[in-house]
Amino acid sequence: MVFYYTIRGGQCLNDHSHITLSSSDIICYVGRDKHENEYLIQYGWPGDIWFHVDGLSSAHVYFRLKNVDTVSSIPLDDLPPDSVYDMMQICKNNSIAGCKLASCKMVYTPHSNLKKTFDMESGAVTYHDTKRCRYQRCDKDRVRVRELEKTKSDDITIDYYQEMKDNERRIIERKKRTRKVQDGMYDPIRDDIDASKIRATRQGDGQSGLDGGLAALEGLSLAPASVDNKDSDAKESMELEPDEPQWAKEEKTRQGEPSEDVRFLRERGHSAPEATAAWDTTRSRIVALRKLYSEGNEVETPSAGVPDNVTEARREEKEVLVAIFGEDDAATFTDMENEDSLDLVLPVTAYEPPGRYEDPPPLLLEVYVDNGIAPLYPNEPPVLALVGGGLPEARLRQLTDRLRAEAMGRAKEEGGEPQIFNLIAFVAEEAENIIEEETAELEVERKKRRDEERAAKAAAAEKRKESSSSNPAGFTSDAERRAYAKDIVAAGNYVKVEDDGKKKTKNSGKKYDTGVSDKSLINDMFS
């Protein structure tokens, strides 16, 4: 059983500043005791935010968005400040030790960052990554606490598992609608969100001719005129962008691979030498993939066969996955007739590639269990592979390694529980982290190249300056100097400087005065 509170909403921050949440958009719920907290930890939603008093015993307080049809999660740093304040007050007030303190330290983090192991007591958790935690001081506010306590509900019994699955289906439906919009179909929800963003940034009374003109131009896409400024950082940054994305270049390179089987392994992030070696020793794509995925460690096949409870767990998980992804064109189930078969390919629908990837293929998660590949799944991790998404081979391998570590950890800590859907959510979150890391590295590389170009230009200018001061005309030999003089004479006019310093002009018309520095050059030709 849980308690519900009504908290304040507000305008989100940073990249989500166009979203304003009301109290009805937010669900704030609290576990009744440490045993109830276990269910909240196990059946939390991907977008939930977990609040707790840092270093002290307290209630587990969760922030959840009610309407996932528009947005399923808000990043930690973008949450409305009033909402965070109320959540911390509720959490502090529901701490035996914390409620007695004038101020205490609070921690909040995404639910997906909570880590639970079997050796922990009920209600105890730790974190997968402390970098994803946020900390704030919370001072006692009796007035606000009394207001919040008035909104507290009675004990409510809920079906955690069913609510989690219903939420997963709603998220999948929203992602399907988003993809249909990208394919040219109309989505009224997305259209309303885009219109709200435009209205939020518009100024005026909505009645003037200017506002009417803006409304008429909303549907137009006007490309800005290019600015020719050689010294601007913007143009330098544009010049440093590759002609085509990295994944497209690598795809062309793989086309030159004579072996389709080696190419299959390379598409999943493995280098050419290791893919070739794995294929040569196994002569089977899936066995080679398992060898690379398990880092060369042999996988033992149970001699006593697969236990009935393992088979039953697979059937239930497959049934749920078919219900969620069955109508998705990107999803593939190897053998739909055999309910015990669990080899499949699922799209990572929450993954959003950056603009620099230029419309890449979808990111897919491949799961291999059948034919002795992972006979004891879900009591052991399956063999997993990632393909597509526009991620370069090195980044795809990096993401696969993190996925493997996550799958092994889940199999060890949550053996027997379904893993595939949670692993899809993990891939989406970790892919976002890898793209952020790649973006930061690219920016460093761009800055380095800009600095090198500027330094080269400055060195060239300094060299020209030094050359000009020591040799005004810039000649490298006497023959070159005389050839230049002949060109001047061929132009028709010249100036000769006599010993008395007076200039005498030959012919009439335009006069070519080569300057004081060329006196000796002209005199050499006509002395």
Image: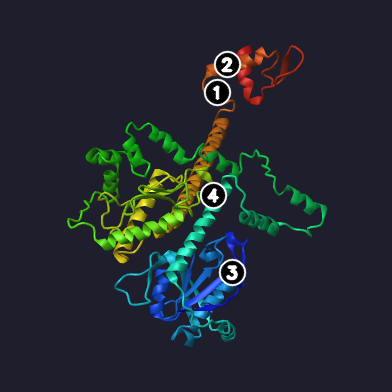
Q: What is the x, y in percent for residue 403?
A: 36, 55
Q: Position of residue 7 (x, y in %)?
A: 58, 76
When the figure is inspected, residue 432 is found, relative to residue 459, above or below; the finding is below
**CB atoms at circles 4 and 3 under 8 Å apart?**
no
Say which residue label 4 marks.
179
Q: Which amino acid does label 1 sit on?
A: Phe
Q: Residue 482 carries which label?
A: 2
The numbered dot on residue 25 is 3
**N-term-proximal mark, 4 vs 3:** 3
Considering every residue shown, the one lying at the far bottom of the view is 100
Tell me the SS state at disc 1: loop
Q: Can you tell which of label 1 and label 4 is closer to the viewer?
A: 4
Of label 1 and label 3, which has the lower sequence position? 3
Q: Nearer the viewer, mark 2 or mark 3?
A: 3
Vertical side of 181 occupied by 65: above or below? below
Kindly give the residue lying farthest to the left in the view shown.
303
Q: Residue at x 75, y 17 (%)?
A: 510
Marked residue nearer the N-terminal end (2 or 3): 3
Q: Do the residues labelled 2 and 1 touch (CB within 8 Å)?
A: no
- Residue type indicated by callout 2: Arg
Q: Which amino acid does label 4 sit on?
A: Arg
Report the Cα–Cα distance between label 1 and label 3: 77 Å
Cβ–Cβ under 8 Å for marks 1 and 3: no
Disc nearer the start of the sequence (1/4): 4
Q: Which of 464 and 306 is in front in this view?
A: 306
> Considering only order in the chain, which callout, 1 or 2, is on the residue closer to the N terminus?
1
Disc number placed over residue 475 in the picture, else none: 1
